Amino acid sequence: MQRPLLHHLSLLLLLSSLITNAAVAAQPRQVSVGVYANEPKILLGQDGRLSGIFGELLNEIARQEDWQLLPQPCEWQQCLERTQRGEIDLLPDVAYSDSRAQVLDFHKHPALFSWSQLYSSENLHLKSILDLHGMRIAVLQGSVQEQYLQDLLDSFGLKAQLLGVQSLSQGFELVASGQADAAVANQRFGDFHAPHYRLQSSSIMFQPAQLFFATRKGQNADLLSTIDRYLQAWQNSPSSVYYQSLQRWGGERPKVLIPTAVWWGLATLALLLAIALGGALLLRRQVREKTQHLQASEQRLNTILDSVEAYIYIKDAQLRYQYANRKVCELFGLPLEQVIGKTDDQFFDLDTATNLHENDRRVLKLGERVQTEEINRSLTGETDLAFLSTKLPLRDSRGEIYALCGISTDISEHKKNLEKINQLAFYDPLTGLPNRRLLLDRLQQALAKHARGLQQGALLFIDLDNFKDLNDTLGHDMGDQLLQQVAQRLSSHVRAQDTLARLGGDEFVLMLEGLSLQPAQAVSQVEHVGNKIVAALSAPYSLLERNHSSTASVGIALFPNDRSTVDEVLKRADMAMYQAKAAGRNAMRFFDPQMQAEVSARASLEFDLRQSLAERRFILHYQPQVDAQGQLIGAEALVRWQHPTRGMVPPAEFIPLAESSGLILHLGRLILYSACEQLVAWAQDPQLKQLTLAVNVSARQFHHPDFVADVCAALAESGADPRRLELELTESQLVEDVENLISKMSQLKAQGIQLALDDFGAGYSSLNYLKRLPLDQLKIDQSFVRDLLEHPSDAAIVRTILALGDNLGLSVTAEGVETQAQYEALQRMGCRRFQGYLFAKPGPASALENWPRTPTTE
Ligand code: C2E
Ligand code: MG
Ligand code: MG
């Protein structure tokens, strides 16, 4: 039973399937088709049927295949979504894209080729994608074009406002109403509708597309393959409905059947061309913009470079000017074009150019940054400018130096000021010669150089003779003129390496360097110069259009020698100059080593003197003074120096030095005090209390303002009787300031002190004022006493002095009485007071204490 049942069941199924199939075959295939307004490709005709190219093609296929097409009107985006959901079987006019192929299936042979194109109003000419910068562009919202266009704009760096629209016609309307500048549409729609909106197609095309019927992924494969079959056949037949439809909707004729690949090639080419064109234009625009930008910044830079006060330039590796700012051009007096390519030897003299090139090469060859002072002399030698230049190497991207950039600042003014300051500090304004300061500096340098024994030098101290007289008689202006003429004459005898300076007043110094190393030769070289100078300076001068004669004395010191310090050399030359003066002026003298020895001896003596004063190594010896009967009437205090090594040193050897060094003030005070103490001691002795004690006073001591006070203080402090003190003055100290002298003497006399004039007759006291001096005594100079018996003239002088004393009421003492004959002769002449070896040599005070009442006779 089983078997017939199964058999029946299978039969039943077969039948039912046959019945079903027969029923299906009988009914047309229903195909829902998405329709939206995209004339001429797809639209819903007024009869409710599909229209447009896609519509007509599908209608024809449906007719032949007996499909029942069910148009499903929808907006584009909505159509797409419904197709994906399977609510629509076929959606015409879908551009293939990989992303769409994920959700939709496409047939193989594209139904149509299209591309996107921009349409604008007739007066806006869009030539390339670059022209879209800043434009408002209507584009189907969510469409492939929208994204594509955005990417395209981005890749060109352009900014445009994309206005999303729901339909292509809405986009065209926006353009037509001025709310958008351009609208994107597929070329088929655009070309078809543009005239209606008074729009024109631009040459901006992009995104070529293959258009298909699409269906939900995995469905309706039969529909797709059927469509492919028809399209393939039609596209191969120029008279097919396919081309008829294309022609109807867009005027397209299949004159030559172009293979798909060629179509694609052309489209791609067109796109590439558009991009290339756009790219080229973009580049050109960018170049133009960059050029403008560069031009602007170059102009800015030039303005800055031209307005600075520095000289700025660039020189290439061949040292040719590649750039020069305004200051440089002004300096050269040429426009920039004529400066460029030239080198420094075309602008500066040879020395300058060589120096500049040396500096430049350091920058170019060694890559150094050079900062240096450059003195630039123009070709004609007229202008001399000082620059502070900084030069830097310029390197290319590989680090190679290809040029240098220089910035030079004009420091001529600054240098001039420095020179002026220098001039004021180191030069004598009257003669323009170096001053003392500069001379000392140069001498110092010369000594350092010559100390190495390589050269000899000499210092010539030049002093005008009697210049003071000229100044006093003709005035300082004339004096200045003479000094200027002297400076001129001296300058003409000076070599470049020598230094001629004016120390001040009428003192000039000439320093000679580089003399022979042979002393004799050096001396004769200097002698030659010295003689020329003496001769040159003794020639008549013209002052106030009259001849004036003047001479000079020149002292010369050679250096180096063992004590060559600046001071020493100057001092020696000065001393030699004084010797020249002493020799009668208008002369030249070399510094004498003998003189040097004396100077040295004097220096060491002065040192000892100072030392001994501190150690109180000075004592007084006393020499008696007697009357005609040989009776002791007084004594003269004579200082003695107990030198630590030389024993007793007589005053003649150190008093002058004590005077010149000023030590006499200290020494004199010591003597005065100890003399007063001696008087006080004698006052205790009835034998000696009547004695006067004579104390020698040096000129410098006497003229000291404190002298009178010092004497009074010594007397007061010791308690000595002023009437026993006698001060001996020498004639030389009477010559100056007589009024002051008289006043001082009077003050001393008022104290009861006696005053004597020592060594009278040897000096040149004027009798005229001698009588005005409040003196008590004259001491006849020992030279007259010594030769009294031999020379009648000396006897005559002695007699005169004695008579003078009588007339002026002064007592007279004869000094240096050594013989009885002299003693007696003097007595016969009327002399009453005597001093000399005949009676006693100077000795310690004790000798006087033992003095006999009557003088010893031999
Ligand atoms: P003066 O004041 O004319 O002193 C006399 C000088 O003659 C002394 O030399 C004395 O020793 C020397 N004399 C005395 N009798 C004779 C003689 O018979 N024959 C010779 N040939 N000479 C005699 P002295 O002590 O060497 O002093 C020399 C000079 O030094 C003094 O000459 C005086 O001007 C100065 N002197 C001495 N002591 C002092 C002093 O304490 N103060 C100052 N300022 N000068 C002094
Ligand atoms: Mg004396
Ligand atoms: Mg004397």
Image: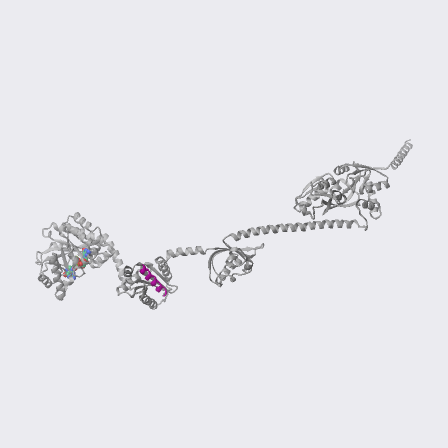
Q: Which residues are magenta?
A: 477-492
Which quadrant would the N terminus be assigned to in this image?
top right
Q: Is residue 139 above or below residue 682?
A: above
771 or 397: nearer the viewer: 771
440 or 444: nearer the viewer: 440
Which quadrant would the C terminus be assigned to in this image?
bottom left
Does 488 lie within the magenta span? yes
Judge left or right: residue 775 versus residue 321.
left
Q: Is residue 847 visible?
A: no
Q: Is residue 363 visible?
A: yes
Judge left or right: residue 629 versus residue 14.
left
Does 286 lie within the magenta span? no
Please state the horizontal and vertical placement of residue 639, each as a whole percent of the image.
18, 56
Q: Quadrant location of residue 246? A: top right
| Majority SS type along the magenta span | helix
782 or 344: nearer the viewer: 344
Please state the horizontal and vertical placement of residue 521, each as a whole percent of the image.
34, 68
Please state the horizontal and vertical placement of residue 667, each as a whole percent of the image.
21, 53
Way the structure is coloured: one colour
Please state the horizontal and vertical placement of residue 388, each as a whole percent of the image.
47, 55
Q: Residue farthest to the front?
A: 545
